[in-house]
Amino acid sequence: PIFAMTSALSTVVPIPINPLTPVPSDIVIAQNATPKRISVLAEELGLNDNEIDFYGKYKAKVSLSVLDRLENAPNGNYIVITAINPTPLGEGKSTTTVGLAQALGAHLRKQTIACMRQPSQGPTFGIKGGAAGGGYSQVIPMEEFNLHLTGDIHAITAANNLLAAAIDARIFHEQTLSDQQLFDKLCPKEKGVRKVAPILKRRLQKLGLADKNIDDLTPEEIGRFARLDIDRDTITWNRVVDTNDRFLRQITIGQGPLEKSYNRTTQFDITVASEIMAVLALTEGVPQMRERLGKMVIGSNKKGEPIDANDIGGAGALMVLMKDTVAPTILQTLEGTGVFVHAGPFANIAHGNNSILADRIALKLVGEDGYVVTEAGFGSDIGAEKFFNIKCRYSGLVPNCAVIVCTVRALKMHGGGPNVVAGVRLPVEYTQENLELVEKGTENLKVHIRNCRSYGVEVVVAINRFLTDTQPELDLVRRIALESGARSAAICSHWAEGGRGAVELAEAVVGACKASNRSDFKFLYPLEWDIKQKIEKIAFDTYGAGKVEYSELAEKKIATYTAQGFGGLPICMSKTHLSLSTDPKLKGAPTGFTVTVRDLRASVGAGFIYPLLGEVMTIPGLGVRPCYF
């Protein structure tokens, strides 16, 4: 096909499912499914043969050349899935994403693609057990989706750790070599002519020395060029691993006999917290990715000047390792509708959204009458706020509708119910009707509705039904959601029924998209505000805080990043997902609390500053009974 699909009727042939009662385990459902070959689905979605690179029978990479072919095609409707603040068990947001896509594509017969993040193996083996959805609303092949997929996370791990190794190696060698020795090794002479690598020409340009003959540099200029003089106390670039491992939260490196002269305390992060993951999610193509990788700041020199991956000399190598990751992966739902899986930044650490590229390709493929369902991590206070203020700002894409997922269980928790603990039987309050707890808990839902409406988008509430919910409880939530500003509120049973159980939700989403006006969309803050103004706008307007305090370290970082020219970047708050506040124990809709900014980091390549609020771990640990049992 030369153009995107223009028919309102989907060209994707659904796969019928026959849900069983009781619902079997996710893996039993997934392994008993009969998926279509990915080549068939690609053709149904309007992809050409030369736009697909196959990774076996049921997954493939989608070439970015689709965007060139469909440059002038209109975009489809754009829906973001978010949620209230969840219990530690999760409230089925990924399941709702898949269920809605199945309802739109397989039941309402709309051209539809779901866009999702690639899950980290840390939570997969740690607490979540996967992120492919659940029940009869899953992405398949489930095992491949949750594990290696097409290798993108492994490539990010390799690229991140190459840069980490390069940083420490450079500091190590600068301790023992003079400026001239460094210069001679970086730019060796071959047959009397000094060789300057292209990456080093970028550094000469940055220092204002590009117009000089390399052999005419003065000793002072040679020192500036060859010696990075990295201040070890400012290094923010950590090694990563895609495993939950609490014992890597603080380590000492340089303990070998040859490295005893150089050791320092550092840490590992989980791979999906790497800035390279955020770069992948926010890039718009290979050339821009190369530039973003080069701009990643790893720390400062002893003069307080930022040092980036180009200065280290490794940005080109990072791009080589990352070249295949730039293409989204195509999979399918249980009912045979399309799914793009691409990038997987954590939402409570990074910006928590799948890639701009996956969304762009999907929006072109579905056509003007089609639908793209994309998921933002955790609640509207985290993933959706970053979707609106970071992802949409960089992509220029405007959503038609926000779907807020809630459950009676989570609302009871916010209404004052007992603690919900993973692996422990739910207290009786959660399994018996309790309208009082539900009504009190809807205060949390009201805040999330208000937050999403403040961006000028239509809001639909998806009430994810559990077996123990009673009809009066569900009706109460629906009534309060509508009274609080939601356009529609639908009771959903897609976990048990597949797309059929989300038809009411799908119809509500179609109606919201028709009623939407993209010109109403607005950001929460302008980029020209200073760092503190932007932090406080999010804290006051989105969280409900009454005060923001800054540690001495945070004050120093704000001054440094402002002086280095990074004050105009958007803000990516790192906080708990379990509360609107920074205290995970504070439920409901608290107000007037204090937000403490304990530290900040600059993800300059990705394009944001991220303040650390409270105690948010950048690498999780394993519990007593992880999901690999």
Image: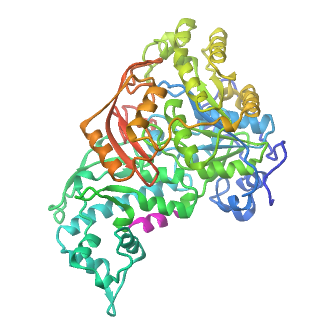
Residue at x 29% of width, y 39% of height? 554
Location of the N terminus by quadrant is bottom right
Using the rendered view, name the quadrant where residue 247 is placed: top left
- In the rendered structure, does residue 577 fall within the stretch colored magenta? no
Q: Is residue 117 something one can see in this rendering? A: no
Residue 623 location, x and y as percent? Answer: 37, 33
488 lies above or below 317: above
The single residue placed furthest to the bottom in the displayed view is 191
Location of the C terminus by quadrant is top left
Residue 568 location, x and y as percent? Answer: 44, 47
452 lies above or below 274: above
Magenta-tinted stretch: 314-323
Closer to us: 398 or 169: 398
- In the rendered structure, does residue 315 fall within the stretch colored magenta? yes
51 lies above or below 408: below
Q: How many marks?
A: 0
Closer to us: 33 or 541: 541
The single residue placed furthest to the front in the displayed view is 528
Residue 404 location, x and y as percent? Answer: 60, 27
